[in-house]
Amino acid sequence: MDPSKNQRIAHGVAWELKARYSTTDLNDPNLPNPNYGGKANIFSFGFNWYPNQNIKIQMEYNITDHDDHATSKGKFNGNDDFSMLQVRFQASL
Protein backbone atom coordinates (compact mmCIF):
# COMPACT_ATOMS: atom_id res chain seq x y z
CA MET A 1 0.00 0.00 0.00
CA ASP A 2 1.32 3.45 -0.89
CA PRO A 3 0.04 5.99 1.69
CA SER A 4 0.79 8.87 -0.67
CA LYS A 5 -1.82 7.52 -3.15
CA ASN A 6 -4.43 6.36 -0.62
CA GLN A 7 -7.61 8.26 0.26
CA ARG A 8 -7.25 7.49 3.99
CA ILE A 9 -4.21 9.73 4.28
CA ALA A 10 -3.48 11.59 7.50
CA HIS A 11 -0.17 13.42 7.15
CA GLY A 12 1.45 10.82 4.87
CA VAL A 13 0.28 7.67 6.67
CA ALA A 14 -2.59 5.23 6.04
CA TRP A 15 -4.80 3.48 8.62
CA GLU A 16 -7.15 0.50 8.30
CA LEU A 17 -9.61 -0.53 10.97
CA LYS A 18 -10.72 -4.14 10.96
CA ALA A 19 -13.27 -6.34 12.72
CA ARG A 20 -14.15 -9.99 12.26
CA TYR A 21 -16.45 -12.61 13.75
CA SER A 22 -15.95 -16.34 13.23
CA THR A 23 -17.44 -19.48 14.69
CA THR A 24 -16.55 -23.16 14.74
CA ASP A 25 -19.18 -25.68 15.79
CA LEU A 26 -18.01 -29.28 16.27
CA ASN A 27 -21.15 -30.37 18.16
CA ASP A 28 -23.45 -32.74 16.27
CA PRO A 29 -26.17 -34.25 18.45
CA ASN A 30 -27.99 -35.68 15.39
CA LEU A 31 -25.48 -38.50 14.76
CA PRO A 32 -26.30 -42.08 15.85
CA ASN A 33 -23.46 -41.64 18.37
CA PRO A 34 -23.71 -37.91 19.22
CA ASN A 35 -20.48 -35.98 18.96
CA TYR A 36 -19.82 -32.99 21.20
CA GLY A 37 -16.49 -31.57 20.07
CA GLY A 38 -17.18 -28.05 21.29
CA LYS A 39 -18.05 -24.68 19.84
CA ALA A 40 -15.98 -21.49 19.69
CA ASN A 41 -17.00 -17.93 18.84
CA ILE A 42 -14.17 -15.50 18.09
CA PHE A 43 -14.47 -11.72 17.95
CA SER A 44 -11.47 -9.83 16.53
CA PHE A 45 -10.82 -6.09 16.41
CA GLY A 46 -7.72 -4.30 15.26
CA PHE A 47 -5.96 -1.91 12.96
CA ASN A 48 -3.20 -1.77 10.36
CA TRP A 49 -0.93 1.26 10.21
CA TYR A 50 1.22 2.08 7.17
CA PRO A 51 3.65 4.88 8.14
CA ASN A 52 5.17 4.61 4.63
CA GLN A 53 5.01 2.23 1.67
CA ASN A 54 7.63 -0.14 3.14
CA ILE A 55 6.41 -0.51 6.73
CA LYS A 56 3.25 -2.11 8.10
CA ILE A 57 2.32 -2.40 11.79
CA GLN A 58 -0.65 -4.54 12.78
CA MET A 59 -2.42 -4.86 16.12
CA GLU A 60 -5.33 -7.19 16.81
CA TYR A 61 -7.31 -8.10 19.93
CA ASN A 62 -9.20 -11.43 19.98
CA ILE A 63 -11.90 -12.58 22.39
CA THR A 64 -12.61 -16.33 22.23
CA ASP A 65 -15.75 -17.81 23.80
CA HIS A 66 -15.83 -21.63 24.17
CA ASP A 67 -18.86 -23.69 25.16
CA ASP A 68 -18.91 -26.39 27.87
CA HIS A 69 -17.97 -29.16 25.39
CA ALA A 70 -14.72 -27.53 24.19
CA THR A 71 -12.44 -29.62 26.41
CA SER A 72 -9.99 -31.24 23.92
CA LYS A 73 -10.92 -34.70 25.24
CA GLY A 74 -10.51 -33.66 28.88
CA LYS A 75 -7.23 -31.73 28.54
CA PHE A 76 -8.98 -28.40 29.26
CA ASN A 77 -11.94 -27.21 31.29
CA GLY A 78 -15.10 -26.57 29.31
CA ASN A 79 -16.17 -22.95 28.85
CA ASP A 80 -12.52 -21.87 29.15
CA ASP A 81 -12.63 -18.46 27.47
CA PHE A 82 -9.60 -16.31 26.74
CA SER A 83 -8.42 -13.11 25.09
CA MET A 84 -5.17 -12.25 23.35
CA LEU A 85 -3.38 -9.26 21.90
CA GLN A 86 -1.25 -9.72 18.78
CA VAL A 87 1.23 -7.22 17.32
CA ARG A 88 3.12 -7.63 14.05
CA PHE A 89 5.77 -5.48 12.42
CA GLN A 90 6.48 -5.98 8.70
CA ALA A 91 9.12 -4.25 6.58
CA SER A 92 9.88 -4.71 2.90
CA LEU A 93 12.99 -3.69 1.03
Image: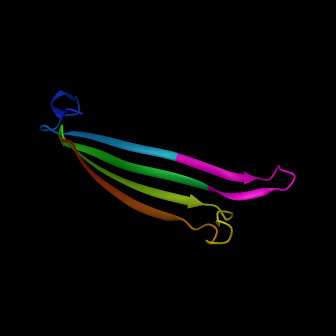
Quadrant assignment, res 34: bottom right
Q: Residue furthest left?
A: 11
Left or right? Give the position of 41 relative to 71: left
Determine if the magenta segment contains residue 57.
Answer: no
Quadrant assignment, res 67: bottom right
Residue shown at the point (54%, 65%) measured from the top left: 81
Question: Above or below — where is 79 with respect to 39?
Answer: below
Color style of the picture: rainbow
- Rendered location of residue 11, percent (x, y): 12, 38
- Rendered location of residue 26, percent (x, y): 68, 52
Left or right? Give the position of 10 relative to 62: left
Residue shown at the point (48%, 58%) measured from the top left: 63
Left or right? Give the position of 12 relative to 68: left
Question: Above or below — where is 67 with respect to 4?
Answer: below
Magenta segment main secondary structure: strand
Residue shown at the point (16%, 38%) measured from the top left: 10
Left or right? Give the position of 42 relative to 91: right
Q: In which quarter of the image is the C terminus?
A: top left
Q: Quadrant of the N terminus?
A: top left
Question: Above or below — where is 89 with respect to 71?
Answer: above
- Rendered location of residue 32, percent (x, y): 87, 52
Q: What stretch is highlighted in magenta?
A: 22-39
Determine if the magenta segment contains residue 35.
Answer: yes
For the image shown, how many numbered marks are present on the structure? 0
Q: Which residue lies furthest to the right in this view?
A: 32
